[in-house]
Image (spheres, rainbow, N blue to C red):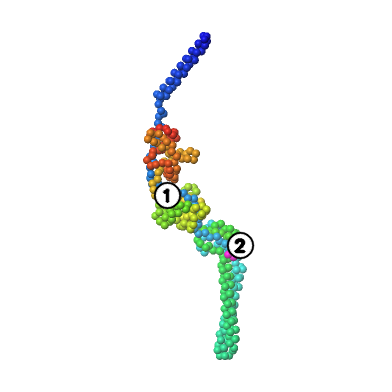
Amino acid sequence: MNTVNHIKLGIVILGSISLASCGGDHKTAQQQAGPPPPTPVTAYTVAAEPVTTVDTYPGVVVALNEVELRAQVGGYITAIYIKDGQKVSKGQKLYEIDRTKYLAAYNSARANVQMAQANRDKSKKDADRYTRLAAQEAIAKQRVDYALTDLANAESQVTAAKANLSAAQNDLQRSVIVSPLSGTIGISQVKQGALVAAGTTLLNTVSTNNPIGVDIAVNQREIPRFISMKNNPAAIKDSLLSVQLQDKSIYKRQGMILTIDRAVDPSTGTIKVRISYPNEMDKLIAGMTVNLLVLNKSTENQLVIPYKAVAEQLGSFYVYVVGDSSKAEQRIIKLGKQFGSNVVVGEGLKAGEVIVADGAQNVRPGAVVKF
């Protein structure tokens, strides 16, 4: 071996010794440093407690009584007595249809009644006279029979004339459209001078607005709960039944369940429930979409944890459960209803278990934590 090779071998040996020495020093440093310190967190002990949540039901405001106004006789609109959207009273005049021909028909029918009555009176006198003469055997009995037949025909003519008069009178009355109820009139669908047809032309709509209703769809599983509220006034007071408007404000008047529909809709599995409200200052308008807020008090205690303790990953919710060795274990849970800053746990936890409430973002599965 020459001198150059001896030098290279010496360098290799020295390098190996240096690396071994460095490696040993690194391991020694790690051993001296020890495991990472526990992660500081805030703990929460899972407990079962009574829970009151608020159930939200989409609803629609509805008039409790609403009538479409349609002409019952045809003709031209000659007068409109109301303004769009005004308050109206039952029996108040709203529209008038040209009454000329209906008034003429009424007068003609009344004259026909008078003529029929005069003819009947004459026939009755004749029948009475012929009856007396027949009793004296002054005329043939056949003449009496003719007179009585004429009287019967005259009576029938009076009846028919009165029926025609009644029909003409109804048509004349129907040429003036009056409000069938007290409430609010809508926007008129016809203008003065318009031609309307009997039974088909929609003139307007009038509806009551105080009280007013809210319709919601309730799952069939909840029917017993709403029946109980309907039959128990005290349950209504404890159940809130508040209306939340679109601007998130709450209409503060208390409602009452007016009716529960007769049948469940098989296509949706829901049933319609109607709640009635006093409508102060007309704040609730038919057709509005609202939310109905109903308190839901659980009959059994439920597990409750702070919602901030829950994390989500790929659609699953989990918390960190702290075991006896202070190690954090990731646990998948099933959430129930959220109320305030807390949430009900349906599955995954037991009462008495300790979870990480604050600081979970700094925790990894298996990490040691301290409170």
- SS at mark 2 in the image: strand
Q: Percent from the top left, x then y, of residue 16?
A: 47, 17
As rendered, which of 156 and 317 lies closer to the eye?
317
Determine the residue positioned at 60% across, 84% down: 146
Q: CA distance from mark 2 to mark 1?
A: 53 Å
Callout 1 amino acid? Asn
Callout 2 amino acid? Val
Q: Which residues are magenta?
A: 72-76
Kindly identify which residue carries mark 1: 296
* Residue 328 visible in the picture: yes
State whether residue 99 is above or below residue 245: below
Q: Percent from the top left, x then y, of residue 285?
A: 50, 54
Q: Which mark is residue 268?
A: none
- Residue 359 forms part of the magenta stretch: no
- Residue 74 forms part of the magenta stretch: yes
Q: Percent from the top left, x then y, of residue 257?
A: 45, 56
Determine the residue positioned at 45% across, 20% down: 23
Name the outermost residue toward the top. Answer: 3
Occupied quadrant, residue 96: bottom right
- SS at mark 1 in the image: strand
As rendered, which of 132 and 361 lies closer to the eye?
361
Kindly identify which residue carries mark 2: 196
Determine the residue positioned at 40% across, 54% down: 235
Q: Earlier in the sequence, mark 2 or mark 1?
A: 2
State whether residue 358 is above or below residue 288: above
* Residue 283 visible in the picture: no
State whether residue 164 is above or below residue 371: below
